[in-house]
Image (spheres, rainbow, N blue to C red):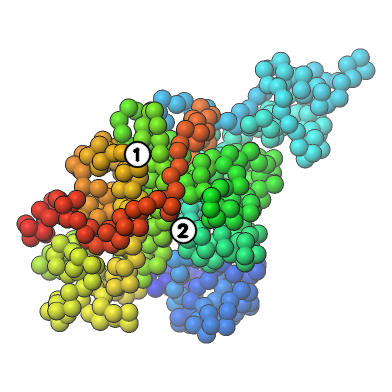
Amino acid sequence: MLLRLTTGREFSVRKGQSVLEALRDGEFYLLASCGGKGTCGHCRVRLLEGRAELKGWARLSQKERQEGMVLACQCYPQEDVLIEVPETSRLVVGEKIALGRAKELKGLLQGLQAPVEPALRSVELSLAPPSIQDNLSDLERLKAALSSEGVEGLSFSLRFLRSLGQALRRGQWRVRLSHALGAAVELAPLQEAGPLYGLAVDVGTTTVVAYLVELASGEVLDVGSTYNSQMRWGDDVITRIVQATEGGALMELRAAVLADVNELCGLMCRRQGLQRRAVQFATLSGNTTMCHLFWALEPSSIRLEPYVPGVSFFPPLRASEAGLRIHPDGVLYTLPCPASYVGGDIVAGVLATGMHLRDEVALLMDIGTNGEVAIGGRDWLVSAACSAGPCFEGGGIRHGMRAVDGAIEKVSLGPQGPRVEVLGDAEPLGICGSGMIDAVAEMFLKGVIDQRGKFHRERLGKDPFMREGPEGLQYVLASGPAGDIVLTEPDLDNILRAKAAIYAGVSTLLRQVGLAVEDIQRVYIAGGFGNYLDVQGAVVLGMLPDLPLERFSFVGNTSIAGAYLCLVSERLREEAEAIAHKMTYVELSVLRGFMEEYMSALFLPHTNMELFPTARRLLSEGGQRR
């Protein structure tokens, strides 16, 4: 039997095999945190054609069932079937583009002059076996051997103590001890000790990304990503805080994102032929709300004046306490969160760019759901957050998606209509953040939309790519295996609101520190975009300040990059703590002028065109970008 996707891919299905199993055999992964038992409800797919036996409906509403939604783990094809896989059900593991980027991290380490020297250390020990004359306990004998190697003051879990005697005797008193941040992790007979592995995690409001790393070399072995399952409780951090506190869903929110991380880790370990126990150290980066929800810390004070988080500097946590399914005595380190709306992700960004090491005034813009920004250099750092929403990561956009194979990443409009570039040279499935920015800039320059981001209705009937849709006018960018990919008027509204929040945050923060746009010597653009963002397009959109192109650097997902750096370098982990201590936070919502800046930025590129000479020039030249 054949299992076909609306994207055109096909998979073989054996008799008695579920859709989930058939997809997994073909290395197409779905969220299934219950392991395919039909209890988590994550592996939702839509059955469009063909007969299948359905053995369960856990967590599917009556409406979803009527719309053809089924659980992949409970769906057993009886003949050839056609299914549609929602983007929110997908896990992307081993993605080529992300793996290619991850290889650049070794160069980043070298640029920061940091050796691969993780906080997870190991020491080989040869202990004298006990005798009648030498009757020290096993633990005291181990401590004495560690002391002779310069390792003092480790804590030992009950689990460690229960396995101590057996490990020592099985290894004939020759063992390897691994430890991290003052905690003993594993004692293994020397002949059984294998390589040590780590996990770097970025818990974003919209997406979760994880790297599996071999710690001795710092090599990234595998990459995984998925949508954050907390999106079921809301797109933004405020909604999730309300759900966690007033809605009583704190533990459910924690369980949802923890399941995402564990599923990614498990799949990567299986692909690499590793036991989860081989992963003994993990680092976590995220905004302050995401970190509090991951730890199941009550987050209500984050959204209430004076906007104070419960924790800024998180103590190391045992994996078993965190619910992280790696070695149970493994250690989880969470990057510090300096303020309520500036978290470990922006600390990671500053660390990864190295802007804290230079004299120049630099601007870091993390273009994600929270839209965090930092300005400064060696002597000072000031940060703020401006909620942009999830549109640049695919949320709230009709055909929006993450920057994975099949995402439109570049758009240009010519006499024959739109021309697009698609990640992975695949059939287009949707559009990612860089594609959205390109598309809106092109549509404005070529007269498809006006300065308010509204379609020029008089073009309807003349432009074959503009048409009426269920939500108003829409513009067809490309046709893919699942149908036309369009941008709608509500999509344009979402994009304009997001870019306005980001630009208003930057301009307000600059005014607060007494600087002009021209004073910025370097702009680092962070975010999960598909390829290098077209800076000129983002300037025309009015999201980035109009500065010479050579001042801009695209630095990708710096949150996961910073988590990786803290995973493989103890020196950089300590540096991240110093950055967090140095950073001053500005609460934009209480500043006079922020809302005026935001309202002015709700136009293309801005109500004050004097701020964007590049856009004025391009419009006067007929809208042809270089």
Query: Does the rendering let one see residue 262?
Result: no
Check disc 1 and report its element: helix, strand or loop: loop
Check disc 2 and report its element: helix, strand or loop: loop
Measured as percent of width and height from the top left, residue 57 is found at: 61, 77
Query: Does the rendering let one see residue 495?
Result: yes
Q: Residue at x 23, y 67 (%)?
A: 452
Measured as percent of width and height from the top left, residue 480 is found at: 30, 70
Residue nearer the viewer, 159 or 374: 374
Q: Residues within 10 Å of mark 2 (few under 14, many from 20)?
A: many
Do labels 1 and 2 touch, CB within 8 Å? no
Residue 206 numbered mark, or none: 2
Q: Residue at x 52, y 85 (%)?
A: 66
Residue nearer the viewer, 170 or 14: 170
Total number of numbered discs in the rendering? 2
Q: Earlier in the sequence, mark 1 or mark 2?
A: 2
Q: Amino acid at mark 1?
A: Val
Q: Residue 86: which quarter of the image?
A: bottom left
**Most distant residue in the left direction:** 621
Measured as percent of width and height from the top left, residue 276 is found at: 63, 46
Q: Residue at x 57, y 63 (%)?
A: 242
Residue nearer the viewer, 538 or 310: 310
Q: Residue at x 50, y 81 (%)?
A: 68
Q: Amino acid at mark 2?
A: Thr
Q: Residues under labels 1 and 2: Cα distance?
A: 31 Å
Measured as percent of width and height from the top left, residue 333 is found at: 59, 39
Residue 367 numbered mark, or none: none
